[in-house]
């Protein structure tokens, strides 16, 4: 069940409490089909289900019919939310409305309860064209970035009548002399645009390890009422950096953050474990079940079933 909440200037929004989710990867499909009781919903990266031929191509997106049929079968069993990787909402040179239109077409077919992307940019102008740098790059936390992002996030909210979430980014470098703290920046972005947050605790943990950032000070400052989804994951140390590699089980520090934040998010819809399919053999079925079971125990402890829907 869910609560309908009307936000001035936006469509009515619905945010059900789904519970514990798992990021869909093709290599995980046998696990997903055999262990349905271990999770409550799936998160899907829609960009993996199509080929993007590039801006101004017609048609631009060629969908994989076989993969789409698999997705249809999965949705018959469990709810599905979208977590896109291709919007590049922070690109200064253009706003990719064609990508937004593609997500809107998916909404017409799937009626997903919410959708998300990354608060970052991956595409930049390069000469007469543009280049995809292949990694999510952070934006400066300043008024200029807010002026860029607010109308874009607001437009997405008006196009697709479900909560739109932006994920706090992992970063391997820091801009000097920031105007705002990251938490203040996220609070203002949500307040001005009507978007919500996907709080990635492993990203937060990664930044704390690489830059000695205080994760709990960040969470204390963040308006947790804007958080609709949480990510946890595992990573690895490589070349002097701890990397958000989605390569294994979550470290203890991430579980401690989850334990702290779960009872403080009044509008939380779900917690998702991210594991890249290429690492599933290393993690194994038993350890993946254990991760999901631990998440479910914590969810039931801190997000009572009597709370039927988010009040966004």
Image: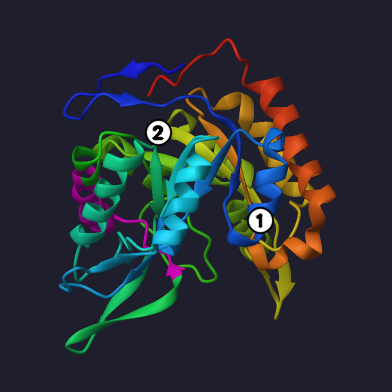
Mark 2 residue element: loop
Rendered-image quadrant of the C terminus? top left
Residue at x 55% of width, y 70% of height: 172
Q: Which region is colored magenta?
A: 136-155
131 in relation to 291, above or below: below
Left or right of 6: which side holds 268? right
The overriding secondary structure of the stretch rendered in magenta is helix
88 in relation to 151, above or below: below
Q: Which residue is mark 2?
A: 113
Mark 1, mark 2: which one is toward the viewer?
A: 1
- Mark 1 and 2 residues: CB-CB less than 8 Å, in contact? no
Determine if residue 205 is in view. Answer: no
The circle on residue 28 is 1
Q: Residues within 10 Å of mark 1 (few under 14, many from 20)?
A: some
Determine if residue 245 is in view. Answer: yes
User: Is 278 within the magenta?
Assistant: no
Q: Nearer the viewer, residue 39 or 213?
A: 39
Left or right of 276: which side holds 174? left
């Amino acid at each position: 069940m869910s609560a309908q909440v009307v936000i001035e200037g936006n469509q009515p929004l619905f945010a059900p409490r789904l519970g514990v989710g798992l990021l869909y990867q093709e290599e995980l499909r046998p696990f997903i089909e055999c262990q349905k009781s271990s999770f409550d919903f799936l998160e899907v990266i829609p960009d993996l289900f199509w080929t993007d031929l590039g801006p101004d191509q017609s048609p631009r997106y060629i969908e994989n019919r076989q993969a789409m049929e698999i997705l249809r079968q999965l949705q018959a069993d469990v709810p599905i939310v979208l977590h896109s990787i291709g919007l590049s909402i922070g690109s200064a040179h253009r706003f990719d409305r064609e990508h937004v239109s593609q997500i809107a077409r998916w909404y017409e077919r799937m009626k997903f309860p919410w959708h998300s992307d990354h608060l970052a940019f991956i595409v930049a102008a390069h000469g007469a064209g543009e280049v995809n740098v292949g990694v999510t790059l952070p934006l400066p936390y300043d008024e200029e970035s807010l002026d860029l992002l607010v109308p874009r996030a607001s437009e997405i909210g008006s196009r697709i009548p479900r909560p739109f979430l932006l994920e706090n980014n992992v970063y391997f470098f820091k801009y000097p002399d920031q105007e705002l703290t990251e938490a203040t920046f996220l609070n203002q972005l949500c307040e001005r645009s009507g978007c919500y947050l996907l709080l990635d605790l492993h990203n937060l943990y990664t930044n704390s390890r690489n830059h000695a950032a205080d994760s709990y000070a960040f969470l204390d400052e963040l308006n947790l009422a804007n958080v609709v989804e949480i990510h946890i994951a595992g990573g690895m140390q490589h070349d002097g950096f701890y990397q958000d590699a989605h390569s294994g089980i979550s470290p203890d520090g991430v579980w401690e953050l989850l334990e702290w934040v779960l009872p403080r998010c009044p509008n939380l819809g779900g917690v998702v474990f991210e594991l890249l399919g290429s690492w599933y053999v290393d993690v194994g079925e038993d350890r993946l079940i254990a991760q999901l079971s631990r998440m479910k125990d914590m969810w039931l402890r801190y997000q009572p079933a009597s709370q039927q829907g988010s009040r966004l």
